[in-house]
Image (cartoon, grey):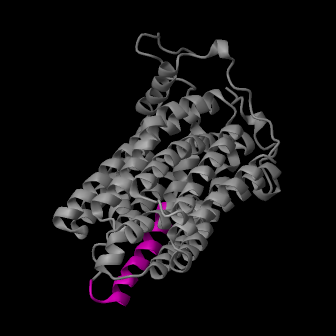
Amino acid sequence: MTDPTAAAASPADGGSIWREPAFVRLWAAASISYVGSFVTRTALPLTAIYLLDAGPLEISALRSFELVGWLLVGLVAGAWVDRLRRRPVMIAADLGRAVLLGSIPVAAIGGVLGLPQLIVVAFLAAMLSTFFNSASTAYLPTIVARARLLAANSALSATGSVAEFTGFAISGFLIQVLTAPIAIAIDAVSFVVSALLLRTIHRSEPPPPAVADREPVLDEIREGIRVVVHDPILRALALAHAGTHVLWGVFGAAYLLFATEDLQLGPAAIGIIAALGGIGSFIGAATAGRFVGRFGVGPTMVIGLTGFAVGNALIPLAPSGAILLGAAFLVAQQLIGDALATVYDVVEQSVTQSIVHDRILGRVNATIETLTTLLALAGSIIGGIVGELFGLRVAFGVGIVGAVAAVVFVWFSPVRSLRSMPEPIAATIPRPEDPPLTE
């Protein structure tokens, strides 16, 4: 059966992806937003650490409320994104996040900034990010042909890597010179610019389902869950994604405290080290297609996850009392772990977009993101508690277990034997009471 979204995608499969005006505008919006977001990723927890004297439990709480925001609306966001045109959802989410983040420097200047406000902003901004991410992932296949999704995802990921380098490098110096709350104002401005650029995209989206054809939201959510649970490829990718996010949860709760307290690194040094991860990610994004051409889709994903686990295992091995050597371990983690994690992410995203029908893609992504966010929340809470009781190095060890589990999930699944992008699956999965699908 022909995919009805193909006509809405790029009209030509050949040539450079940069010849597509709609994609270029989407890329430009993402690029600007990425830079600001990486500034805030460092500035928000450092605001809590430096201005409010936050410790492991406070940073864990900040990260946990952010993840709870994702969880509360994750599945609903996926269902509504599949009901609506995606570009207006992205614009609204950008503008909402600009207002939320802009409140932090305003409160700091007024001398009324406190940890509750940081938690509320992180919580609400995460909700809006859930809608934005669900919409943007589902939007890309409507402006890019299926055969060019790997190239498009590689380009977006490479740009994000450059933004990571730029944003983290800038953030350390901005925080040191202007203070962390003022640095966050840059992210607020970047979201406004992103929204303005998205408004210039005029490529028509496939019409959403008519109101009369919609099922109840809970039924639509269950349909997205069924697709992930019943398809062995999507199921393995969801479990692997969840495993990596256990590590990300611990990382969010422990990394900055480890760098500042155990290794005695300042904001500028932390920013530079994090920026080097952008170089690793750029290399991974630029070489993902070559990995697939050389090894195939499945083996590339195994290589990416293995490198992610090995690279992040270097963090708890960084020695205290030797600043340069400790920093070198963190740099190695950024270059190795980020590079190969990006290779995996580019291929995983392309596989999902290739095999899932357009009007259920939002719910599939939301299902996977909700599972991974739940595991990231668990990792954040566990990381904060273990870090407080047994030390930050032990907490990182817990996270590494999740990264190793991700490798295992992909290895013992059909994903490992994939050589090329799999064919699209059925648009829906039969409910238990439905008769089997027939040809």
Q: Nearer the viewer, residue 89 or 296?
A: 89
Task: Check residue 263 for magenta coloring.
Answer: no
- Residue 309 position, x and y percent, is 35, 63
Residue 284, quarter of the rendered image: bottom right
Residue 190, x across and y down, in percent? 67, 59
Quadrant assignment for the C terminus: top right
- Look at 67% across and 59% down and name the residue there: 189
- Closer-to-camera residue (397/409): 397
Q: Which residues are magenta?
A: 320-341
Q: Position of residue 408 (x, y in %)?
A: 32, 51
| Residue 153 position by quadrant | bottom right
- The residue under the point 49% across, 29% down is 224
Is residue 233 among what the camera can see?
Answer: no
Quadrant that contains the N terminus: top right
**In the shown orientation, is residue 270 left or right of residue 34?**
left
Magenta span: chief secondary structure = helix
One can see residue 76 in this view: yes
Instruction: Report the front residue among 86 and 295.
Output: 86
Q: Residue furthest left?
A: 389
**Residue 93 versus residue 391 in the image, above or below:** above
Residue 38 picture location, percent across and down = 55, 64
Q: Give the quarter of the image for residue 63.
A: bottom left
